[in-house]
Amino acid sequence: MSRVLVFAFDIAEAAQIRRIRSFAAAGFEVMSASMRRANMNRDFEPDWPDIHLFVTRNESPVRRAATILGAIVKMMRHRNVVAGSDMLVARNFDMLAIAWASRLMQRRGRPRLVYECLDIHGLFTREDFIGRAMRAAERFLLSRVDLLVTSSPGFVREYFDPVQKYRGPVAIIENKLWFDGEAIPRPAAPRQRQPGEPLVLGWIGSIRCAPSLDLLMATADRLGDRVRIEIHGAVHHHAVPGFREAVAARPNVRWFGPYRYPEGLAEVYARCDLVWAQDLWQRGANSDWLLPNRIYEASWFGCPSVAVADTETGRRVRGNNLGFVIGQPTAPDLVALLEGLDPEAIAGCAEGLLRRDPHEFRLTVAEVREAFLHLPEVRARGAGARRAATAEGQAAGPLR
């Protein structure tokens, strides 16, 4: 059995939990070394061995660097855990720095190092000295990893290939649904909107995109009682200031709070005719390149997604018939789409989603094993995967 040590930036975050449990289901002996943030799942305790590093928050670069150094010092006391691992998986840049330093402490038998990049942080796309320094640091560590894992080909095509000049192996593991046991059943039929009932547009997941909030509130104002905006999930209030006030000011908008994952997904999506799937937080960079888990969740439950056409999300939604797209992320564009969609068009799209192969939206044990268990095989595939990703579109702007 291969032993994997996951360096997690927030052990209570749903995506971290999904990945770690997918490792266990794939037959790995799994441990973690983790940070913890206080903005979600505060009572969560991992049911696998975990090395607690620090409680963190959205910190200044100086405090962030100090936290990284402190975590490296802590890991010195756990050199035996690192030495006993076959693979270190770091789930963002900070954790990659800690994992690399932890591996450097080993004199021999060093485990393989995997960088799983979930997002391209805004620090890495800045054009100033700070951005150049962050990219240089990441480039240094990229040259020392055995595998890069990302959730979207857009990250490879637009950033890692043209900007960071990364030429190592790549594996794409999309943000699909993960079920620890039996899958939550898919609906037998799509939601039927009753005559006279407003169209329900959902915003589901981690609520941290201020431009999406502004867009949805403006849409609610323009459509009035013809639309209901339902928001489900944990709100990152530092990222969306004024969220409570904006929701409270509109009778056709409601926030339902966090939900249990994945148990609560069926109820949440059953309430919605459509779901707003587009991230706008870092327009022109990360937001344009990512593939969010919303499109897989919504499609599993037969709920069409709405995205912006010129983004990776929009291209996937339109190309795979997962929903509908708008030309620009503006209230007039979204209002025009919603006004032009009749119930039959929405129901037809939803029915098509429910007829699709469920493996399009659900991560399997085989996919996890394929990416992580045999790194030499992944290395051989890496160049081809990267060329395929690059062929999908043009490279990003001149970051260096």
Image (tube, helix red, strand yellow):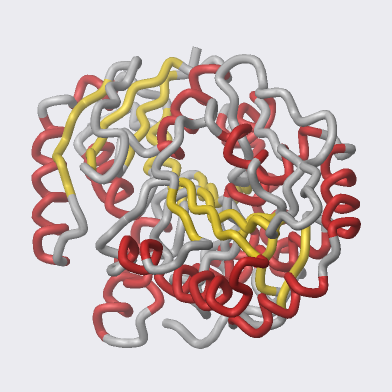
Report the residue at 24% width, 33% height from top.
Answer: 42
How many numbered circles are shown? 0
Q: Is residue 108 left or right of residue 168?
A: left
Q: Position of residue 322 (x, y in %)?
A: 78, 54
Compared to residue 157, the image places residue 49 above or below, namely above
The quadrant in which residue 140 appears is bottom left
Q: Residue 205's spot in the image, x, y percent?
A: 49, 48
Q: Nearer the viewer, residue 395 or 308?
A: 308
Identify the residue at image location x=89%, y=37%: 355
Residue 143 versus residue 214 in the image, above or below? above
Q: Quadrant of residue 240?
A: bottom left
Q: Does the image show residue 360?
A: yes
In-front residue for pair 204/378: 204
Q: Is residue 371 above or below residue 218?
A: above
Q: Is residue 169 visible?
A: no
Q: Describe residue 87's horizontal placement relative to residue 177 as left or right.
A: left
Which percent across, then down, holds residue 185?
72, 23
Task: Name the foreground residue: 390 vs 338.
Answer: 338
The quarter of the picture where residue 393 lies is bottom right
Q: Is 62 above or below relative to 46?
A: below
Q: Which residue lies at the image location 52% right of the left edge and 75% below the top edge?
A: 215
